[in-house]
Amino acid sequence: MNLQDKVAYITGGTKGIGLGIAQSLLNAGMRVAISGRRSFNAEEAAKELTIDQNRVLGVGSDVSNLPDEKAAVSKILEKFGQLDVVIANAGVGHFAPIDQLDEGKWHQMIDTNVTGVFNTLKASVEALKKSKGYYMTIASLAGTNFFQTGAGYNASKFAVVGFTQAAMLDLRPYDIKVSTIMPGSVTSHFNGHVPDEKDAWKIQPEDIGELVIDLLKMHPRTLPSKIEVRPTRPDLKPKA
């Protein structure tokens, strides 16, 4: 894919991995739309990304709500006239033993992490058919490795991986590429974390951005459909 002036939509793009991907794609010459649950936050994050507001758009959308995602895609098409890349990045995580996991938190993870990726694809698939575009989900190594206190989060990320791989098979006939990226520990604001120097050993958001660009530049005949990525030196994690 020639990235110059192509249009990408990134959900959960106001901070962390989503914002890092957005900046990388802008640096590569693309035009970018980012979403967050609150329009104000998305618009403010968009202003921080670039001084050329003709190349970036911030929109409010709750990915768990299909009409929100359809409205977001409509705004993107109205501003940019096309949609070439969609990255379903929005996600939440709550961790507790299964007997203590709150029902509301379970539903929030399923609604955001699983239904959200469905809604984002459902809202954008016709535009991607026209552009012969690329759909990506940001899953997690928790989508293949289960762990204690992770039942709800594991369930959601296992589902994201399975959904994305099946969607890849469905959409190949339209020349739409589909991949899932499964990061391990990433420096982000996930689950209320505030990044600091102790996160230096982790994958950085811009690293995921570079990976996205590598996927977009892959020859059309080749599709890395599931990518696991992890810190090189987890042993450098500061001791508690």
Image (cartoon, grey):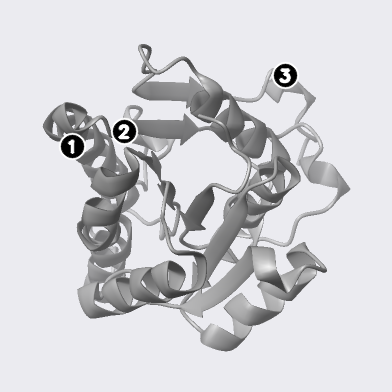
Viewer-nearest of discs 3 and 1: 1
* Earlier residue among tags 1 and 2: 1
* Picture layout, residue 184 above or below residue 192: above
Question: What amino acid is found at the position of numbered circle 1 in the picture?
Answer: Ala
> Where is mark 2, residue-wise?
178
Q: Quadrant of the C terminus?
A: top right
Secondary structure beneath dot 3 equals loop
User: Can you give x and y, in whole percent of width and height, for residue 59 in the image?
Assistant: 50, 77
Question: What amino acid is found at the position of numbered circle 2 in the picture?
Answer: Val
Q: Dot 3: within a 10 Å radius of its alpha carbon, few (fewer than 14), some, or many (20 or more) residues? A: few
Residue at the image point whose x is 42% and y is 76% from the top = 75
> Where is mark 3, residue-wise?
233
Classify residue 224 as left or right of residue 163: right
How far is mark 3 from mark 1, CA to CA?
33 Å
Residue at the image point whose x is 39% and y is 18% from the top = 220
Q: Dot 1: within a 10 Å radius of its alpha carbon, few (fewer than 14), some, or many (20 or more) residues? A: some
How far is mark 1 from mark 2, CA to CA?
7 Å
> Where is mark 1, residue-wise?
167
